[in-house]
Image: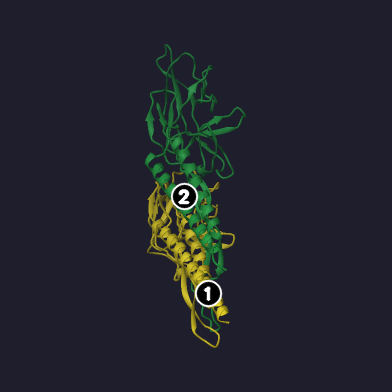
Amino acid sequence: MRALRIAATGMAAQQLNVETVSNNIANMNTVGYKRQRAEFQDLLYQNIERMGAQSSDTGTIVPTGIQLGSGVKAAAVYRITTQGTLSQTGNKYDMAIDGKGYFQVQLPTGETAYTRAGNFAVNQTGQLVTTDGYSVLPQITIPQTATDVSISASGQVQVTLAGQATTTQVGQIQLANFFNEAGLEAIGSNLFLQSGASGPPNVAAPNSTGFGKIQQNYVESSNVDAVTEVTSLIVAQRAYEMNSKVVTTADQMLASAAQLKS
Amino acid sequence: MDNTLYVGLSRQVTLQRSLDVTANNLANVDTAGFKMESLIVNTDPLDAPAPTNTPVQYVLDTGLARNFAPGSFETTGNPLDLAVEGDAFFTIQTAQGPVYTRDGRFAISADGTLVDKNGNAVQADGGSTINLDIKKSSPSIGRDGTVMQDGVQVGKIAMVRFADRGALSKTGDNRFSSPATNPPLPATDSLLRQGVVEHSNVTPVVEVTHLISISRQYERIAAMMNAASDLSKQAVSRLGRVA
C-alpha cells in the first residue's frame, strides 16, 4: 500500500522538523547563533494516466490525468542569517557586528573559521582570542600597560597606555563576507568554515560598503524567536499525528480487506 | 451475482488511490508552495452480457483535481523568502528546460546568482538570471519583482501565468512542468512579497475527514461484498436441499 510509505515519509520529515526546532530552542541564548529552518519538497510523481493523453479515437484529451505523489523529503535545513538583537554587556572586549560580515578566527589546525559571536577575551600574552582561546585574525595584541581599550565602528582597536594622554592604534579588525552565508559549514562552537556553497570570503574593514559596523561592549544575541519556534513545534507535532492517522487508516483498510469472506 | 463483487472492487480500488492522494497531501502539509489534490471519481456504466443486459455502474477514477488556491502566508523577515500574490509562478532554469514553482524560498549561490534550494537559477525577465553584487547590501525586492541593491536595479524576477493551469503536471521538488501547448505568459497582475513564505494550501481538517470517510466507505463496501458472498452460499445450500 502506497499510503503507508507516503505517511512514513511525512513522519520522517516532521521528525526532522522537531529536531531542527529543538536545536533552535536549545541555542536561544547562544551568542551569534542563527536559527535554522527545515524545508520540505514533494517527492516525485507517478503518472497513472498522463495528462493530455487521448481518451478516444476522435481525439478527446484527458484534461487533468492522474498523478500520484510519493510523499515528502527534506530539501534543506536552511540557516536564516537575519540580524540578532544587540545586547549590552559592558565587557570591553565584547564586539557585535551590526550588519553583514563575520569575524575571522584561526583554528589550531591553521584553518580560518568564521563567527558572528564576538564575546572575545585576551589570553595570557595579551592576544585577542575567542572563548575557546583561538586567536582572532588579524592578530591583535593588547599591551600589558594598556589602561583602556576602545574599538571604533570601523574596527580600529586603540589603547590608552599608562601615563600617556593620546591613544595608540594596536590593530584593525577585518570582517569576511560571503555571497551565500547560509552555505557556510557549521562546525559547532559558533564557528563556520568556508564551503563550496558559500563561495570564497570577501575581506574588508567593518563599516565599508556592504559590511556591518562594530559595536564595542555589545554581543549579538541569537535571532531565535521563542514564539515562532513554539508555533513551529505545534505545527510539526500535529502534522506528525495526522501522518500517523494515515497509517492507522491504511491499516484498517487492509484489515477489512483481509477479512473478506471467500 | 458476481457484479456485486466487481462493482465493490472497483470502488475499493478507487478508495485506495484516494487514500494515496490524501496521504500525499498530509505528508506535504508543511511543504511551501504545495498545492493539494483530490481524485475525481465517476460512474463507468457497462452493459452486462446477455441475457440480462442490465447496465452496471462501475466506479472509475478519471482524473485529479488540483486546487491552486493560495496557501497561508507567513512573514519570516528573511530577505530571500518570496511569495506570489495572485496566480503567477516563478520560473526556474534547469538542464531539462524551464520549470515553474510557487515555492519562493530562494538562496544565493557561491557566485552570487539567485537560485532555488536545489541550486537552479531563478529566471529574470528576458530569460537571464539575477546576479547580485557581494559588495552591496542585501537585495530589496519590489512588489513587481524588481531586485534592487543599494538603490541600483540588478534585475527583475520573471513571473508567469498559464492559460490552463490544469495542464500543468507536478515533477516533484515543489515544481510544475507545462506542455508546449500551454506556454507561460507574462503575469502582469501578480505581486511579490519579500520576507514572506507561502505555505502548503492543504487543509488538515478536510484531509483527516477524508481519511475517516475513506476508511468507513471501504469497510461498508467490504460488508456489502461479505453479504453478497453469504447470499451465494445460502443459495447453493438451499438449492442443494431441494435437489
Residue that appears at 60% across and 32% down? A111
- On the question of residue A6 being in view, the answer is yes
Q: Are marks 2 and 1 on the same chain?
A: no
Mark 1 residue crowding within 10 angstroms, few (<14) / some (14–19) / many (20+): few
Where residue B230 sits in the image (x, y, percent)? Answer: 52, 71
Q: Name the subunit of mark 2.
A: A
Q: Secondary structure at mark 1?
A: helix
Nearest to the eye among marks 2 and 1: give it. Answer: 1
Residue B49: image x %, image y %?
A: 55, 85
Q: Which residue is mark 1?
A: B234
Residue at x 43%, y 12% (from the top left corner): A162
- Using the image, determine if residue A45 lies above or below residue A58: above
- Residue B138 lies, with reference to residue A118, above or below; the image says below
Q: Is residue B101 above or below residue B76?
A: below
Residue B182 makes an appearance in the image:
no
Please, what is the three-letter code of the amino acid marked with disc 1?
Gln
Q: Colour of chain B?
A: yellow
Protein chain holding label 1: B
How crowded pointer 2 is (Cα within 10 Å; few <14, some 14-19, many 20+) is rated as: many
Residue placed most toward the observer, B40 or A40? B40
Q: Residue B236 in the image: x percent, y percent?
A: 56, 77
Name the residue nearer the viewer: A173 or A125.
Answer: A125
Chain for colour green:
A
Mark 2: secondary structure: helix
Q: Quadrant of the C terminus of chain B?
A: bottom right
Q: Amino acid at mark 2?
A: Tyr
- Left or right: residue B239 versus residue A239 is right
Residue to which mark 2 is pinned = A240
Comparing B130 with A55, the one in front is A55
Q: Position of residue A121 (x, y in %)?
A: 48, 22
